[in-house]
Amino acid sequence: MESQFILKVGSKGEIFPPKEIRTATGLEPGQKILLQVHGKHILIQKIESAEDILNRPAKAKISYHVLQDLESEFE
């Protein structure tokens, strides 16, 4: 989903994303974000915590026995 929003910059340079953006992206107070500058363009990206990454559903499923077989190959 691509959306556009018009925001104001606060008196101290703060940018306040609307609730719709915070909800859609899972942004929470105090969370770190990555800000990249490309010429006159700004890209803001959520930095996921290790906990967020580990709580994602697995993209591949593997049985315990197959995992053991793979581990034994690398010993």
Image (spheres, grey):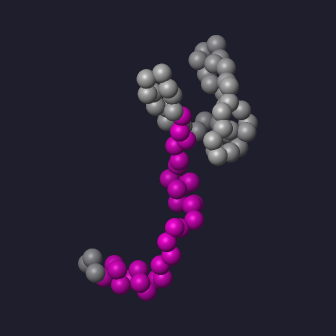
Q: In terms of depth relative to the viewer, which is nearer, 39 or 63?
A: 39
Task: Using the image, determine if residue 9 lies above or below residue 26.
Answer: above
* Residue in the picture at 43% in, 27% down: 38
Task: Using the image, determine if residue 9 lies above or below residue 1.
Answer: above
Residue at the far left in the pictured view: 75
In the visual, does 9 lie left or right of 46?
right
Tell me residue 24's x, y (percent).
68, 45
Is-magenta flag for residue 71? yes
In the visual, does 14 lie left or right of 68?
right
Q: Is residue 3 visible from the viewing direction of this image?
A: yes
The magenta region covers 44-72
In the visual, does 1 lie left or right of 52?
right
Q: Quadrant of the C terminus?
A: bottom left
Residue at the far top in the pictured view: 11
* Residue in the picture at 65% in, 17% down: 10
Q: In terms of depth relative to the viewer, which is nearer, 32 or 18?
A: 18
Is-magenta flag for residue 11? no
Q: Is residue 26 visible from the viewing direction of this image?
A: no
* Residue in the picture at 48% in, 82% down: 63
Tell me residue 51's x, y (percent).
54, 55
Task: Using the image, determine if residue 6 lies above or below residue 49.
Answer: above
Tell me residue 46's x, y (percent).
55, 41
Please identify the quarter of the rendering in which residue 25 is found: top right
Tell me residue 31's x, y (percent).
58, 39
Count of residue discs: 0
Task: Using the image, determine if residue 23 lies above or below residue 12.
Answer: below
Q: In terms of depth relative to the viewer, which is nearer, 15 or 65?
A: 15
